[in-house]
Image (cartoon, coloured by chain):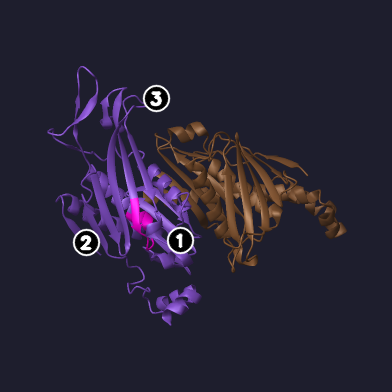
Chain colours: A purple, B brown
Amino acid sequence: MADDFKIAQPKQYQRLFLKDEVRPDGRAVTGCREVKIHVNTVSSALGSAMVCYGNTRVIAGVKGRFAEPTINNPNSGYLDPNVMLPMLCNTKYRPGMPPDAAVSMSHKLSVLTTDITDLMELCIVPGKVAWCLYVDVVCVNDDGNVFDAAVLALSAALYNTRLPATHVNEETQLVSVDKEGEKTPLVMKFLPVAVTVSIFDGISLPDPTESEEDIQSGTVTCCIDDSSKIRALWVAATLADDVMSATLLYIQKRAAVLLSVLKKVSDRHNTSMSET
Amino acid sequence: LLYTIKFEPMLAPDENSIRVRPISSELSVLSNCDGSARVKQGNSSVMVGIWGPVDVRPAKEDPERCVIETTVKAATGHGSPLDAMLEEALKLTCEQMVILTAHPRTSIQVIAHIESEDGSVVSVMQNALCLALMVAGIPMKSMFGGVTCVELESGELAWDPTADEEEESIAKFSFVYESGARHVVHVQSTGESTVEQQLLILQKGRQVVGEVFSFYRESFEKLLRKDVKYQMMLPPIIKGEVLDSLVEPQG
């Protein structure tokens, strides 16, 4: 019967829980779901990570390909993030064109990662060959807040990316991967994480689930890096200044927690860790 | 019906002076639309056309509210992910500002055409959207206006930046404010900044958006001056004196 009520009157359902200062999944109003990070899960990738925010699960993998640098930037490589929301992650996604949410998230990730690494470090032979790192972020289960999981997975994957040594054949000028050579870790200028807060009835609910996303009246997404600077801010909500500053301060604190977990996991390779 | 107005914002020049480019508007540009507006800020020009509320396919309709559909066409080239982001920005602003529950099971179609790009295009588009919605008579909670600010390498802030200033910038901030309590309704900030900086620029932006709102007022007063029905509604005493003083530029 509770399920029928939830389907028929989703907003009233949410309000009943909020009146008792809990959320439908049992957490506190300002609580976030348990976050699990596993790194180096995809062995064929240069770097990878799987992130779980409760039931939302996202996998990011970094694949390296050789590419020719552009004429304008002959000493730079490429970093190309892409978010996929396949049909398997949620029944609302239909076959055909990628959903608007995926296009929007991909664009946001590429804006976020414009200066994340020195692209000149990815150059192998100036003007001829450079690394092109494709970061594929795939959502395998969408239970709300895919973007936060996607950013954390992308950061974890890049942080754990090790570029193989390359060998240039003197005669043919062809570049190949030197399997015996030592791998160099990808140097990141900053490590971003995203925290999303949904606004419902004027109440801020961080880390919304899918059903909470359906009824929200607004959303605040902020990406904070490891020096507590804002890297990006997207707000689609009518907010007074005091609510805005309180939300940003909350996000800063939450981001610091997520980053400490990310760093702890990555410093011990091939292990996993969870934190609430 | 074409009405063109040029407005030079008068902001007292001092060390904190905020320079914005001259802004002009043309209302009811497109005769087939329910509402349309073209806004130019400097060399950036965007035209927005609105049809609504109109019929919507049963698959897309919502029994409780109006569905907003937006399309953005750039000046040149085929569709790009940037257009998708601009479409999302317009849709999210509409969802905050338009009273969607007033027209359930319908749709409002918004088409924005970027005629020329010279910086602050997101804000120019939001301003054109607001004027077009007002001309179309779509019920809104209040007016809204957009401002863009960039932080240059020197640490200086440039408001209503040109495309060159945006190229050189290290951070870009776009805010849309509603005209009642001037709360922020849409924010798009990229580049490195601190929490304090965001909030400071947000507060400063309110001064700039005040100029945008007084420009809207002027645009509409000029539109209504030529409207015979509106003129007939006014009592004869007011027509001659007070109305003229209302449209005189202040300050």
Do the numbered discs 2 and 1 sit on residues whose CB atoms are within 8 Å?
no
Residue A92 is marked as: 1
Name the N-terminal-most of marks 2 and 1: 1
As drawn, B99 above or below B26:
below
Q: Which chain does the residue under circle 3 lie in?
A: A
Do the numbered discs 3 and 2 sit on residues whose CB atoms are within 8 Å?
no
Question: Which mark lies nearer to you, 3 or 1?
Answer: 1
Name the N-terminal-most of marks 3 and 1: 3
Amino acid at circle 2: Ser
What residue is shown with label 3?
A: A72
Do the numbered discs 3 and 1 sit on residues whose CB atoms are within 8 Å?
no
Name the N-terminal-most of marks 3 and 2: 3
Answer yes or no: are tags 3 and 2 on the same subunit: yes
Q: Residue at x 24, y 44 (%)?
A: A45
Query: Which region shows up in magenta?
Result: A138-149
The extreme top residue here reads A171
Mark 3 → mark 2, Cα distance in angstroms: 44 Å
Amino acid at circle 3: Asn
Q: Residue at x 19, y 59 (%)?
A: A273
Q: Is residue B199 left or right of residue A54?
A: right
- Badge 1 local density, few (<14 within 10 Å), some, or many (20+)? few
Q: Is residue A140 magenta?
A: yes
- The C terminus of chain A is located in which quarter? bottom left
| Rendered location of residue A70, percent (x, y) | 38, 26
Amino acid at circle 1: Lys
Q: Residue at x 46, y 56 (%)?
A: A94
What residue is shown with label 2?
A: A274
Q: Which chain does the residue under circle 2 lie in?
A: A
Instruction: Determine whether the residue tagged by mark 2 lies in a helix, strand or loop.
Output: strand
Comparing A274 with B247, the one in front is A274
Mark 2 → mark 1, Cα distance in angstroms: 29 Å
| Rendered location of residue A86, percent (x, y) | 39, 54
